Image (spheres, rainbow, N blue to C red):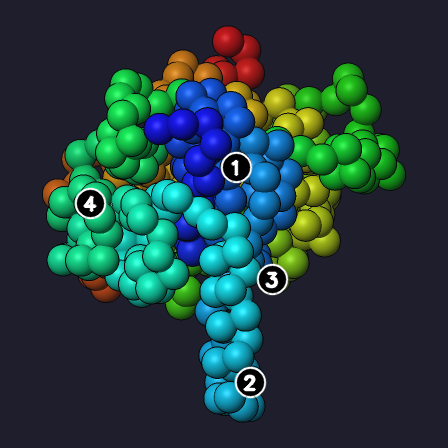
Amino acid sequence: MKNNKKILLVNPFAIGDILSSTSLIEELRRKFPHCFIGYMCNRRVASIVESNPKIDEVFIFEKNEYKKRWRVSRIKCIWSFLKFLRLIQKKKFNLVIDLSLGDRYSFFFKLLGIPKRVGFNYKGRGRFQTHKLDIPGFEEKHVVEYYFELLKFIGIDGKPPPLKAYLKEDDIKWAEEFLKDNNVTDNDLLIGIDPAGGESFGPQADIKRWPIEYFAALSDQFISQLNAKIIILVGPKEKEVVDKIRSLMQYTPIDASQSSIMQMAALMKKSSLIICNDTGPMRFANAFEKKVVALFGPTDDKVYGCYPSHERNRVLKKENLSCRPCYKKFRIPKCEYNKRCLTEITVDEVFEAGKNLLSG
């Protein structure tokens, strides 16, 4: 493959999936420094990709926006979609690496005449790919490794490099001003907690979350015993989670729910320790090489945990439960055990894990 090639990466999923693809991006740029690399993603995660200097252009494809246009005017929706396809066609991509697990994107890329289309053949959905990897789902190995394995079709083998995340100067400055306004100095022990997440699970998001009251008790413990400052790292849609924690706490945490995704990431990079559910922001902490205590319930940390595993990361989970991990083949069953895989992880366990990481 020559350096004058044009490569399009396609990933329609959430924060964690985008960050899990950064190993692939790093290796592509290292192997082919002069290639043009485009990235197609949804609007919510576009800022993550736009901050990455290894990406030349971002193409935003938001399915929900097209659905709204369809309801208003089918003709205008079709014209809008054709205009987007024309934008892709004008770039004359030679290669598409499709991480979507579906067949709709590769179908249109075939129509556009992109000669090499690489992706997954999950449930036979790789039918429009020219090169495909048969998978039953993401099992036994990390999703980063699944993504990276697609590079074998362009002659790249080996082990994926660590995840990488990048920040723009504006986001770094915003975080510095925010912390200053909240009386946080460089001498303070700043601990970030992410008690929400799992938005990609929709109505089932709560199934991945350690109980709110546990996060509140844990935060009080860090403040009272280690004189830490606690910052709650959630998105604007999760403000009610912050309000609930604040109502349960004896002390007052810092509310960062007004931050954007990349502003939240900048605050995370300023923190000494991150405690979180299995969420997209956990991958930011991972990519920034922060100390992380990650709480895993229904999902498998071997597939969705920090990558690569490192002594600065602690995964807390209940190994002795036959029902976990129950998230398989991208589906999660109704829990009949009141989320015991998470509720049985105690506040003291998490506190000790965090304290040990800080002292180590």
Figure check: 48 above or below 319: below
Identify the residue at image location x=35%, y=23%: 160
Tag nearer the camera, 3 or 1: 1
x and y percent of residue 157 in the render?
26, 21
The mark that comes first in sequence, 2 or 3, is: 2
Residue at label 2? 76
Q: Amino acid at mark 2?
A: Lys
Figure check: 100 above or below 253: below
Identify the residue at image location x=30%, y=45%: 116
The mark that comes first in sequence, 2 or 1, is: 1
Identify the secondary structure beneath mark 2.
Answer: helix
Q: Are marks 2 and 4 in contact (CB under 8 Å)?
A: no
Residue at label 4? 132
Give the Cα distance between marks 2 and 4. 34 Å
Residue at label 1? 36
Residue at label 3? 237
The mark that comes first in sequence, 3 or 1, is: 1
Identify the secondary structure beneath mark 3.
Answer: helix
Q: Amino acid at mark 3?
A: Lys
Q: Amino acid at mark 1?
A: Phe
x and y percent of residue 209 in the render?
42, 50
x and y percent of residue 40 in the render?
48, 52
Q: Are marks 2 and 3 in contact (CB under 8 Å)?
A: no
Q: Residues within 10 Å of mark 2 (few under 14, many from 20)?
A: few
Tag nearer the camera, 4 or 3: 4
